[in-house]
Image (spheres, rainbow, N blue to C red):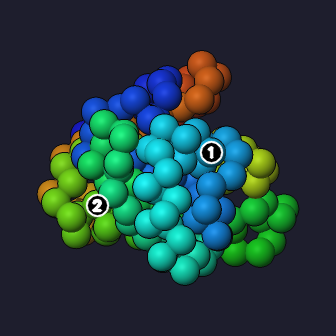
Amino acid sequence: MLTTAIQADITTLQVDAIVNAANSSLLGGGGVDGAIHRAAGPELLHECRLLGGCKTGDAKITGGYRLPARHIIHTVGPVWRNGENDEASLLAACYRHSLALAESVGAQTIAFPSISTGIYGYPITLAARIAVATVKACAGNAPGVQSVVFCCFSASDLELYTQVLHELAD
């Protein structure tokens, strides 16, 4: 599985599935969640209303609607509470469940934002290590997924993800 990092707007990527760092209602919000909902159009909100929300660490899938991506995988990352409330395992579960859903719909390419590092306050250095390590550890469980892109918001985030990818290279 090829893993790379780029700085881009995740809503513009030509991949089979993008991952949405959603809130538990799945009904849109700020940050990447709001951007994805705005770009995908009102049909996404309608489908999300039918899903009944999502628990932290879990993931659900919808169509991509007006996005170049065919699918949106919505996952709810943990709110950072000083690392003392199982945040690391919940964050890793977001990546595992998202990859499993991508595999289940035949997605060969998937893009992840930096889950939980915005308003949820997860330290990006810790989150990037969990993201990369979990994706690499799950490669054998999602053999159809050929490419994973970590889509970074800023140049500093890209630099960090690139460094972690290099450090954790096979």
Image quadrant occupied by the C terminus? top left
Q: Quadrant of residue 79?
A: bottom right
Mark drawn on residue 17: none
What residue sits 77% from the left and 75% below the top? 85
Residue identifier under label 2 = 102
Disc 2/disc 1 C-alpha distance (Å): 21 Å
What residue sits 62% from the left and 55% below the top? 28
What residue sits 77% from the left and 48% below the top? 119
The answer to which of marks 2 and 1 sits earlier in the sequence is: 1
> Does dot 2 land on a helix, a strand or a loop?
helix
Mark drawn on residue 34: 1
Q: Please say whether residue 139 is visible from this viewpoint.
A: yes
> Which residue of the protein is positioned furthest toward the right in this rendering?
82
In the image: residue 122, left or right of residue 45: right
- Residue 131 position in % (x across, y down): 50, 52
Crowd band around label 1 with a 10 angstrom C-alpha radius: few (<14), some (14–19), many (20+): some
- Residue 5 position in % (x across, y down): 42, 31
> Does dot 1 land on a helix, a strand or a loop?
helix
Q: Amino acid at mark 2?
A: Ala
What residue sits 46% from the left and 56% below the top? 44
Crowd band around label 2 with a 10 angstrom C-alpha radius: few (<14), some (14–19), many (20+): many
Question: Which one is in front, 140 or 5?
Answer: 5
In the image: residue 88, left or right of residue 141: right
In the rendered image, the vertical position of residue 18 relative to residue 150, given as above or below: below
In the rendered image, the vertical position of residue 165 relative to residue 28, given as above or below: above
- Residue 98 position in % (x across, y down): 40, 63
- Residue 108 position in % (x across, y down): 19, 49
Question: Which one is in front, 18 or 87?
Answer: 18
